Amino acid sequence: MIAPIKKNEKVLRQLSNLAAEVTAEVKSAKNPSIDIPLRNLSNVNFNPKKLIIEMGKAKQSREFYNISMARKFMQTFLVAEKCKSVLDEGKTTSIRDLYYMAKRDIPGTSENTFEEQVESDPIIEDLEVTADALREELGLFASNKGALVGELTLRDMGDTIDGRRMGSGGWSIPSIVEPNIIQFKKCDAKFILLVEKDAVWRRLNEDKFWKKHRCILLHGQGQPPRGVRRLLHRMVNELKLPLYVFVDNDPWGYYIHSVIKQGSINLAYESVRMAVPSARFLGLSSFDKAEWKLDDRVIIRLNDEDVKRAKQLLEYPWFQKKEWQKEIRNMLKLGYKLELEALSNRGISFVTEEYLPKKIRDKAFLD
Amino acid sequence: MAEDRVEPGSATSSAPAVKAGRGSRVSVVPMAGEGAAEPAPRRRGAAHVPQTAESLAKRQREISVSEFFAKNRHLLGFDNPKRALMTAVKEAVDNSLDACEEAGVLPDLLVEIQMKSEDRFRLIVEDNGPGIVKAQVPKIFGKLLYGSKFHTMKQSRGQQGIGISAAGLYAQITAGQPVRIVTRTGAKKPAYECELHLDTTKNQAELVHEKETDTWHRDHGTRVELEFEGKYEKGRRSVDEYIRQTAIANPHLTLTYISPLGEKTVYPRQVQTNPEPPKEIKPHPYGVELGTLIKMMRSTGEKKMQGFLCNDFSRVSSQIAHEILGKAGLTSNTWVQSVGLKEAEALHKAIPQVKIMAPPTNCISPIGEDRILAGLKATVKAKCYVATTRRPSVYRGNPFLVEAAIAWDCDGMDSEDPVTLFRYANRVPLLYQQSACAIAQAATETSWKNYGLSQPRGSLPLGPAVLFIHFASVWVPFTSESKDAIANYAEVEKEIKLALQEVGRKIGTFIRQQEHAQREAKRRQIFERYAAILSFSLAYLQQKGAVGESKLATVQKQADRINGWLVKIAKRESALADRLIKGSLVAVDKDVHVVADTPAEPPADTNE
């Protein structure tokens, strides 16, 4: 049994208040509306002191009597209704479950309240920011994504997990990693290493890199989900460890690092409890091919989308540091990208025995 | 004069027309491009014709009428049995309407077609016109081309005066039955009844039977009965449709129609006055063809060219006549008789080089917007009607005018189909050769998308609509002698397009409003559907504690209250939708006539 979600009553009160406000408007024959904080680039600020992305104050009014908003308005409260029913029973549910709970036909139409989960997921995020209740507080979790091995013992729902004895697959990182569920116990690690890809993570695990270099080794299956980011945040702050990020050398790799470090635009309201401003970008760097004398055949040409995305990154306030501009511009200049696996060109364990140790030793990272 | 007597079908006669002189002389002449034949008597012709030609003419006469008819049935509209039935109806109805209007009587017509056998019909057309004096009866019904509107430049239904006698001739040839006529000129006089047998060799009518009677039910009027070979079919080019379209363009008419199948339809009178009678005008020099010019010179009473030009044409002052004659190498004092073919050609070429004022246009009598609307409303059930009458314009010296109307959202029409086109020339429906007609071409080339109608490339617009276009002129430029399609003169097409654009703009206003109202109605449906779900969520969220079975009723009760409020706001927020549903959508444009009493169905949800 999962321990009761914290602030349970508070969240229920917040949802009830939101409904009460709308009901009052309806009763007085007003066009009901709710103000939803904007979750896009125009409404995020980079806080140079805290070094994180923060959500601005801009809000968007969602009205019921507006043909382009009516459906979403209805959906927002339908999601809230289902969250209450889950919270009332003291349970948690996956966002996919919630989608099925809320999906039903609308009488007199061939329309459903939700057609796809991609429709309900952003509504959940809307509800989070509007009711000022995090997804975890609403009793919602996403599917497990990402894995951990390494020099750490932790407790998960009362069970002891020894990161040193997780076999080849590692410990699957749950979506909710709040302290009431996950507690850190014995830690012998000196740093944390997040790898973009599980294939590379497997290579490092197989070579027992974490044992040799005394670290905690994670991957987030590409763009790390909230659970992984929240776990990284807690480990860095509670265990006082440095975090290194090891990603492909392409615009998407850069962005994964920046999301971990400063937070994301869409979930800017979560940055405070997820961002790790001290995270360090270990590689791959656009200068690595020359520096490590990689074969010419390992390169992949940048496509139009890559170039477009790279140029967007150059504009983001949190990519304005000189080193970063240099790093990205060099990639654009060279016109190619590199995958982590490109390092295997120099031998199967080149990454574990030469590349990573030297980079960490030389502090050859971007901040 | 000998040169204009040519056998039909000879090399010089590409479009022959039959002509009848006074008496029994019948000759076939090459027709001038406009088909304007000469008036009956020729002043000097007979005296100058040599004896040999006269005898030749006699021989021609023996064969000419029936042979001419046989050879030229297609020109007269009797080319096939189906068409023949319609043409007979058309000629009889045209005659009756013209007679009533000229006499200032509001027309009240009966058209009855009896089916004797599958290919044999008896047509009865009865009017309340002035009647015909006894002595005239054989001439009117018995002779081809006996008429009064043969050479006038005047807007009229029939132009060549072939008319009812051709129908009689056709009846004679195909069925051998005499034409039966009943006519009465006043309540105090007896009705005259007779049967006429047409002598096609003499171009004369023989009375088979005649009597006077007091028992006819009309105070004045004429009844014609013809029996002939024909074919009856329903459809877009049927007699039924011809009658219906005639009723629309002639709302001053009461018409009772009994179809060959015995179906009786009454088209009641919609307006209580006859149309303004059109005025006669003299031809304008710009419109005159060489052949017509030559014939006008032959038949003029003027001796000198100056007088001929000034008095036989409109808008020719002595200054202008002088100018024209100068350019043609003639003088004011040139004798008309001395002008030969070469000089006539020079004259014809000189005319366009001189700037001449456009002809007067007050000779055109439009149907009028209100009357078109009245005719359409009575006959075509639709939700909205618009009409427009253009100002008169001129093509090649001929004054003309275009009117257009749209009946939108007609009962029983599919919005995916092209609009139905009603074409008229001088109030007469045109049912054949639509694609060759300037009206259809202009309608196809008009960009209807601007007015909210969809239109496939190179096609008429789509929509549940009737598109009504009337072309009125002293001289309608038909593409051929069968008078089915209007020729595509630039000025004509331009005016038709302008008329279409005017009605397009008017109907566009309505269509946009209706679409807006439909969107509003759909919006309301969406609000109402979501409202039921929203109100439950709102009630549920405000319920304290877990909502089990026991509390569900309480939540539902509160949800119903909230839903009531929401629906009320939905009604207010989509108020325009009510205007559609009640059918009282009042168009902003005063020109747009909306039928208010027709309740519109709420639009179907596209998702359904």
Image (tube, coloured by chain):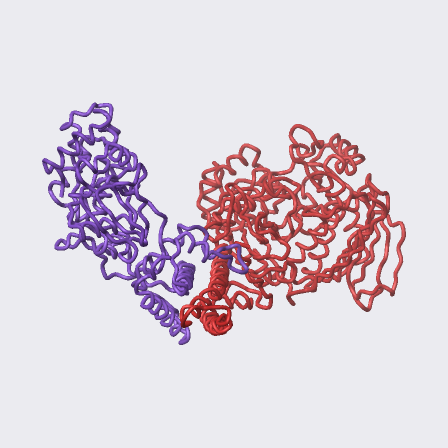
Colour of chain B, in one word, is red
Along the viewing direction, whichever of B272 and A348 lies nearer the viewer: A348
Image quadrant in which you'd find residue B341: top right
Where A82 sits versus A142, above or below?
below
Q: How many marks?
A: 0
Q: Is residue A108 toward the left or the right of residue A150 in the image?
A: right
Q: Residue at x 82, y 69 (%)?
A: B188
The location of residue B200, given as percent across then percent down, is 81, 40
Where B545 sits versus A138, above or below?
below
The location of residue B165, given as percent across then percent down, is 76, 47
Along the viewing direction, whichever of B361 and A326 lies nearer the viewer: A326
Colour of chain A, in one word, is purple
Image quadrant in which you'd find residue A71: bottom left
Along the viewing direction, whichever of B608 and A83 lies nearer the viewer: A83
Along the viewing direction, whichever of B46 and B484 lies nearer the viewer: B484
Please identify the quadrant where the N terminus of chain A is shown: bottom left
Residue projecting furthest to the left: A362
Residue B472 in view, yes or no? no
Please identify the quadrant where the C terminus of chain A is shown: top left
Q: Is residue B48 toward the left or the right of residue B263 in the image?
A: left
Q: Residue at x 56, y 45 (%)?
A: B440
The location of residue A347, given as percent across then percent down, is 22, 24
Residue B162 in view, yes or no? yes
Image quadrant in which you'd find residue B298: top right
Q: Is residue A73 toward the left or the right of residue B414 in the image?
A: left
The location of residue B579, given as percent across then percent down, is 51, 67
Where B285 sits versus B245, above or below?
above
Residue projecting furthest to the bottom: A28
